Image (cartoon, grey):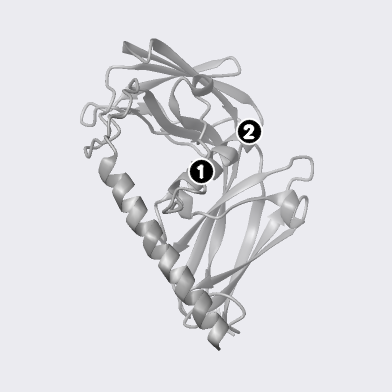
């Protein structure tokens, strides 16, 4: 008993000294961040489902700005897919938001190129491009979801274990990267992309399988709820981008020993702009009733 008490006392003393030292250092810092050029931020996608496929353009702001990123208006935007060219039109009531001039369905397994021309240069450029493709993913026949009492092996004691099974055809010729959106009673559980499960089929023994199985601890679903989902096949480079976004969003080491997080590198002009434009193969799971087991 004596030895642990001595160790804990020493650790406490060192911790107090570190806090005191860090406090003095912080007080002496002169915050004068280097001015960084404004960059274009692109957010958008096209899928295998018919639609106008919205796209937004923003401009990055100063590091310490508390205001939303300014929208970028007046751009000319087109999408080239095979021999077809599709034009985007700006929403007159929402500057910086653009939509296809007519509903289109993205061609599966075909590369496409997005071209953006701005009225004014950002970071020395007014021409921006992005290239991606819609990679065929699993075609869902049905899903099932069952709730089980949490055996307290993982998760919170108050949570339940949700076992989700997806039945269909998962392509064997592709290594697929998936993003999953879950709905409870037709309402999306989260509209934040970093909250969506993202996985690689081959890492989970799912490549070419007819059943994909998942297990979640959850407090969101209750017996009698309806569960539905979207399983979205995304390009590999978008998966890497999301990994970067997730790492940036994680709380850092308060003492700064962990180092800076990885950058979320987009596909707009190979880093000359921020954000991502990607192809998405969307499959919908049929709604099921969640039962208690």
Judging by the rendered image, the residue that carries numbered circle 1 is 259
Q: In this view, does 129 lie above or below 140?
A: above
Tag in front: 2 or 1: 1
Quick one: label 1, few (<14), some, or many (20+) residues within 10 Å? few
Q: Residue at x 48, y 31 (%)?
A: 276
Name the residue at 55% across, 81% down.
4
Whole-percent x and y of residue 281? Answer: 59, 41
Is 288 placed above or below 6 here? Answer: above
Q: In the rendered image of this protein, does residue 17 appear above or below residue 220?
A: above
Q: What element carries label 1?
A: loop
Quarter-wise, where is residue 84 in the image?
top right
Q: Position of residue 216 (x, y in %)?
A: 57, 69
- In percent of width and height, residue 279 lies at 55, 34
Q: What element carries label 2?
A: loop
Q: In which quarter of the image is the N terminus?
A: bottom right
136 and 42: which is toward the camera: 42
Q: How crowded is mark 2: few (under 14 residues within 10 Å), some or many (20 or more)?
A: some
Residue 88: which quarter of the image? Answer: top left
The correct choice, above or below, for 179 with respect to 10 in the image is above
Residue 280 or residue 199, whichever sits in front: 199
Q: Mark 2 points at which residue?
A: 108
Q: CB of mark 2 within 8 Å of CB of mark 1?
A: no
Q: Return the x and y of residue 208 as percentages of the image width and height.
A: 78, 50
Q: How far apart are marks 2 and 1 (CA)?
A: 40 Å
Tell me if residue 58 can be seen. Answer: yes
């Amino acid at each position: 008993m004596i030895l642990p008490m001595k160790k804990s006392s020493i650790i406490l003393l060192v911790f107090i000294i570190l806090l005191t030292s860090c406090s003095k250092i912080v007080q002496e810092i002169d915050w004068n961040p280097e001015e960084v050029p404004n960059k274009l931020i692109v957010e958008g996608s096209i899928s295998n489902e018919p639609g106008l496929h919205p796209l937004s353009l923003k401009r990055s702001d100063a590091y310490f700005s508390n205001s939303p990123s300014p929208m970028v208006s007046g751009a000319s935007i087109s999408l080239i897919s095979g021999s077809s060219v599709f034009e985007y039109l700006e929403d007159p009531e929402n500057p910086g938001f653009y939509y296809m001039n007519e509903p289109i369905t993205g061609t599966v397994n075909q590369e496409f190129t997005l071209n953006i021309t701005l009225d004014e240069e950002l970071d020395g450029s007014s021409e921006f491009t992005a290239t991606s493709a819609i990679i065929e993913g699993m075609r869902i026949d049905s899903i099932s979801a069952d709730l089980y009492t949490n055996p307290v092996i993982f998760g919170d004691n108050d949570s339940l274990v949700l076992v989700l099974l997806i039945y269909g055809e998962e392509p064997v010729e592709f290594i697929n990267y998936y993003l999953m959106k879950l709905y409870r009673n037709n309402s999306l559980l989260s509209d934040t992309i970093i909250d969506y499960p993202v996985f690689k089929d081959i890492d989970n023994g799912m490549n070419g399988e007819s059943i994909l199985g998942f297990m979640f601890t959850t407090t969101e679903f209750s017996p009698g709820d309806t569960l539905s989902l979207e399983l979205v096949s995304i390009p590999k480079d978008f998966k890497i981008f999301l990994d970067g976004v997730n790492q940036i969003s994680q709380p850092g080491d308060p003492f700064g020993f962990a180092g800076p997080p990885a950058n979320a590198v987009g596909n707009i002009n190979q880093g000359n702009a921020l954000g991502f434009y990607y192809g998405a193969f969307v499959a919908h799971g049929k709604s099921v009733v969640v039962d208690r087991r």
